[in-house]
Amino acid sequence: MTALLELSAIRAAYDAITVLHGVDLSVRVGEVVALLGPNGAGKTTTLKVAAGVHPVAAGALRLGGRTVNGVDPRDLARAGVCLIPEGRGIFPNLTVRDNLLMMSFTGRPVAEIEEIAFARFPIVAQRAGQTAGTLSGGEQQMLALARGLATDPAVLLLDELSMGLAPLVVKRLYGQVAEIAQQGVAVLIVEQFAAAVLEIADTAAVLVRGRVEHHGPPDLGLRNQLATLYLGSAP
Ligand SMILES: Nc1ncnc2c1ncn2[C@@H]1O[C@H](COP(=O)(O)OP(=O)(O)OP(=O)(O)O)[C@@H](O)[C@H]1O
Ligand SMILES: [Mg+2]
């Protein structure tokens, strides 16, 4: 099966400084790809390129086989590309319900958005009237995911979903992400530390200084490489 999202020899820069030096990555429908790597490797930049919010300097970004270099990020969003940025991407001063209500800009009725969100994350329903900033970290990520699902994504791009969360909470969240993928979404997950995401990933890529150094199944070879990379910190 062909890739839904494909980055081919992607280069990207901030002003004169190139930070991605020819990144190849592809994600198929129903697949979870983990993009791992140390601080400053270019993981977030890769996601931003995929969402069209950071320009491609060279190479090709393809969606469903069509080259979409330079396409407006709003058009990519309409085509089903959903980026959940680092730091949760919710509005902490608004209620949970209003965070969901805002997603009705997509044209989807509020009732339907709530139905999808509450069915997948019952705890979000229980917290509907609460200010989003008062939710636990895990609940905030569920809300961020629920907001993403409101767009009916074909491609879901997740940046450091596990940041600051307890291992058990991360495990549950990734269980949900795996289910979302199985329902026909191409999922690309960025994480600095790998353990939880490798449980659900079909493929893992390790990015080091803007280059994919390893690409393949999340097997022992990959775990060993990560262990070396992080020099003692648990992969
Ligand atoms: N807005 C920016 N302006 C200039 N340089 C930037 C900017 N954002 C990122 N960079 C640089 O680009 C490189 C890649 O950054 P990026 O945020 O993509 O890495 P990352 O792998 O997501 O790192 P982290 O694990 O810390 O989130 C780094 O050297 C970073 O300093
Ligand atoms: Mg990052």
Image: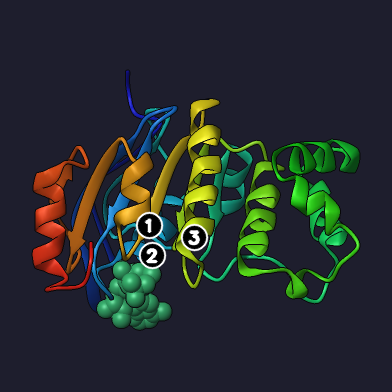
- Ligand 1 is found in the corner quadrant, namely bottom left
Q: Label 1 CB, ligand 2: below 8 Å?
A: yes
Mark earlier in primary sequence (2, 1):
2
Q: Mark 2, mark 1: which one is toward the viewer?
A: 1
Q: Which residue is mark 2?
A: 44
Find residue 183 and report its image quarter: top right
Q: What is the quadrant of the C terminus in the image?
A: bottom left
Compared across the picture, whether 55 is left or right of 222 comes to: right
Residue 226 screen position, x and y as percent: 16, 60
* Of 171 and 45, the residue lying toward us: 171
Q: Is residue 31 above or below residue 83?
A: above
Q: Label 2 CB, ligand 2: below 8 Å?
A: yes
* Of 37 and 233, the residue lying toward us: 233
Between the residue at mark 2 and the residue at mark 1, the CA separation in whole angstroms equals: 7 Å
Between the residue at mark 2 and the residue at mark 3, the CA separation in whole angstroms equals: 12 Å
Mark linked to residue 161: 3
Task: Please report contact status of discs 2 and 3: CB closer than 8 Å, yes or no.
Answer: no
Q: Mark 2, mark 3: which one is toward the viewer?
A: 3
Residue 61 screen position, x and y as percent: 35, 44
Q: Residues within 10 Å of mark 3 (few under 14, many from 20)?
A: many
Mark linked to residue 190: 1
Compared across the picture, whether 125 is left or right of 82 comes to: right
Q: Residue at x 83, y 59 (%)?
A: 127
Q: Is residue 61 visible?
A: no
Q: What is the quadrant of the N terminus in the image?
A: top left
